[in-house]
Image: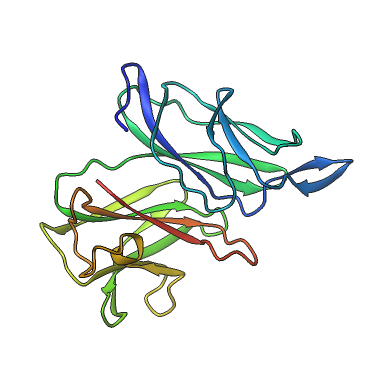
Amino acid sequence: MPAQPGSASVRFIEGAPDLETLIDGVPEGIGNAYLQVNGKTVASAFNYGTLTPFVAVPSGTLSLVALDTLGYSVGPLASAALSPGKRYTLIVVGTYPTYSVLTFDEPAGNGDAALSLYEASPTVPQADFGSFAASSHSDFKQLGSASLGDVTTVTLGSRVTNFGGYVGPTSNPIGSVTPSQINSFDTDNVLPFHSADRLSLFLLDPKTGSTLGPVLSSLDQ
């Protein structure tokens, strides 16, 4: 969604393994959460691994609160100051009692295929990432690295096929994904594909027992 005048375009990720607050004096999870930004609900479900679409929000510093239907909450958590007309990814990270919001400027594309890593795992200060052959799940090649709170993007050329992206060491990746896992119509794992030219990888702290994470992904432009 394009940002309106005076606003920024933002998507939100819940990257904290457990959203906890004091309930009867004991830290407990708040259950199924929803997300309010500056007092307005922007996501009706905001649990671990949630990746929202881009929405228009006021520029400046945002106040994020995750709540459940009983009124228990985590936050408010402040973002960095957002500039009007720009695009951002905001990721909630941390563990009780210390949660925060990491603010990532969205990389500017030029139409070429690209791979990005958003490093949002406080337990992993720096992570490598790269490509592999999707058809054989082999030939892992490191292309770059990112530090906590940073997004690193590498350009792959005008077009790539049989492409997948991974995070972690080549010998033991933390997670890997192919474009066809995100969009089943991209059967040859090609980038660019329709309007998408970038495979984005988001490294989170893992949640015990969750089938999501610690690497999320999306196809972006």
Q: Residue at x 32, y 51 (%)?
A: 152
Q: Which quadrant, please, contains the N terminus? A: top left
Q: Where does residue 144 sit, x and y in percent of width and height?
A: 30, 61
Outermost residue to the left: 158
Q: Residue 184, position in %: x, y?
A: 30, 64
* Identity of the residue drawn at 57% across and 43% down: 45
Q: Residue at x 61, y 61 (%)?
A: 207
Left or right: 173, with 63 as reference point: left
Which percent across, then down, holds residue 192? 17, 56
Please state which of residues 65 and 152 is positioned toward the viewer in this rendering: 65
Q: Nearer the viewer, residue 106 or 192?
A: 192
Report the side of 105 relative to 94 (left or right): left
Q: Nearer the viewer, residue 109 or 72?
A: 72
Residue at 58 percent across and 52 percent down: it is: 48
Q: How many marks?
A: 0
Q: How is the image coloured?
A: rainbow
Residue extending farthest right:
24
Q: Name the outermost residue toward the front.
A: 185
In front here: 19 or 128? 19
Counting from the top left corner in percent of width and height, residue 26 is at: 86, 46
Q: In this image, 139 relative to 122: left or right?
A: left
Q: Quadrant of residue 116?
A: bottom left
Q: Is residue 180 above or below residue 74?
A: below
Can you tell which quarter of the image residue 210 is in?
bottom right
> Does 80 sit above or below residue 109?
above
